Image (cartoon, grey):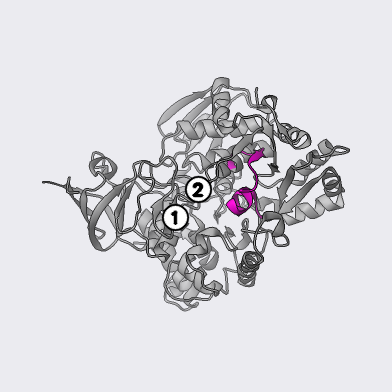
Amino acid sequence: MEKIVIQGRGVIPGVVEGEALVCPHSITGWGGIDPKTGVIKDYDNPNKGKSIKDTILIMPGSKGSNGWSCYFGAARAAGAAPKGWIFTGIDTSVGVASAVMGIPTIVEFPEGQDPCKLIKNGDYVRMDGSTGIVEILVGEE
Amino acid sequence: MIRLTEEEQRMLDGEEGRLKQVAIENIIRYGEVLGAEELCKVTKATVFCGNHNYLEVNDSPDFHEVFTKLNMGRDEVIPFDRTCPDCYIQSCVAACDLHEYKAFNQEKEFFDRDHYFIEEARKAGVTVVGSCSPYLTGWIPVRGEHYVTTESGMTILGNSLWGACCNSDGIEAAFWSAICGRTPKWGYHVQEERHATHLFHVEASLDSVIEWELLGKVMGTKLPGVVTTPVIVGDFKNVDFVKLKSFFTALAITSNCRMCHIVGITPEAPTLEAAFAGHEIQGEFVVTEEDIQAAYEPLCDRPEGPVNLVSLGCPHYDIHQIKQIADYLEGKKVADGVNLMIWTVYPIKAMADLNGYTRIIEEAGGHIYTSTCPATIGDVFLKDYPNQVYDSLKQSGAVRSSSLEQNIYYTDVCGCLEAALSGEWKEDLRWKK
């Protein structure tokens, strides 16, 4: 088993670990998930049908509507939030959603360390929202 | 670390109550995620009031519990009973009309809950408007003014056309800003961050509203998925506000773009050089007539047959647009079995009444509705209409991505009205240059 370590900017503290769910084209915020279950509804999302609940959710950033954050916030209220989430970059909708969720959050990775490319669905990931360090145990499904 | 003024520190210390304290705590946390160093004052806000479907995860009868948990992100109950007095705050579209619910197949219980939620927001200082187009009631931020909105189309319009300053904040942050009067000074709130990043040469001639809308989709498809600020150059003629509001809305919903310069038209792009302000061009594209037509084709279904719903007014129509509908419909009759809906905001509806446009439209068999739209109401209304016609890329796209399998037709206003009058969708109603 190979271990890869990458580091972004840790913005909301907390140490969590779990299975990665990688959405390389993000998730449509407004209506892209069922907030009661966390199941992805996006019609063209490769992870359609999978749930974000209790995962380490990995996305490049937000996508589409100004309402991007509220379905994730609703998932938090319903107990269907991820354990933590990781974004390749940073944008304002990601900022709002992270402030609402309050789960460990890491953003803005350097070139060559894009978590959307280095992490695959099912990889076991440990993240530290203070230091920004992400440990990836590749292939442990 | 965000530097706070004395006033902001007092809010954070709770001296102005728990609601403002949590609002500014959230704004600071939001700013820290972005990497902002200070906050700026917000003087205009639109907020998303009403019993919207994302709130359904909490069925508490207490609005304030639902509000705190969903919009403030806290597991306590903090009464939403005040807003920032220095901020001009309007409500966006609601989940219901304030007067009608049977017309949309909604339950009385849902209508009452929506009304209750809106009334509590009104008591807290939000003016009830119920529109995606807040400028129709005088909510117009000027150049350099900092504002927040839940409408992506309003974000890009205000940044681009008026030179006002706004980010794509979202529903919760608009409430936080409306309560504490602050937002992180980051992104488009910083003058140096408003320069163009990508250049579009528009070779296609843009004569009508639908062509400007389709330009928005073409650009949204070509731009990368990250936040970008395109600038467009071309031989633009007869540009007006309706074309631009439709263009900006289509661009916003098909991309992560929240500001777009138009050389010679928008205030921060008197020239191409001024738009880039010395920064490099990160990408360059050409838009042709073929791009515009190709962008249209997948947006309009093919089967010919009966039409059940024709909906106009996304973004909400102004009074001149309603006059044009009345002029077209005068002395004509909408076909049996067709629901012709025209969407606007209450004061514009009152003006349509005053000018006799409402009477003409109703005599023809159409109706003017306010405060919401089919996509916002959702499947409870749309499920009964197997064949729907829209004059808006945003509206037609939003209903297409719902879980229902229906024919969705998108064309220009004349095509929509002809479909309503004949009750039939025919191939020649498809838009062509």
Would you say B75 lies left or right of B238 here? left
Direction from residue A139 to residue B302 in the image, left or right: right
Residue B43: name its quadrant: bottom right
Screen quadrant of the N terminus of chain B:
bottom left
Quadrant location of the C terminus of chain B? Answer: top right
SS class of the residue under badge 2? loop
At a point 23% along the width and 39% down the height, the residue shown is A112
Residue B216 on image: x %, y %: 55, 34
| Residue appearing at x 38%, y 54% in the figure | B34
Secondary structure of the residue carrying numbered label 1: strand
User: Is B374 inside the magenta-drawn segment?
Assistant: yes
- Which residue is disc 1 drawn over? A34
Seen at 40% across and 41% down, the residue is: B226
Find out whether residue B115 is within the magenta segment. no
> Does residue B250 sit above or below B120 in this rendering?
above
Q: Look at the picture and state if B259 lies above or below A93.
A: above
User: In the rendering, at what x and y percent does residue B208 appear?
Assistant: 68, 30
The magenta stretch is B372-394
Residue pointed to by mark 2:
A65
Give the image location of residue B112, x and y in percent.
Answer: 65, 68
Q: Quadrant of residue B243?
A: top right
Going by the numbered disc 1, the residue's amino acid type is Asp
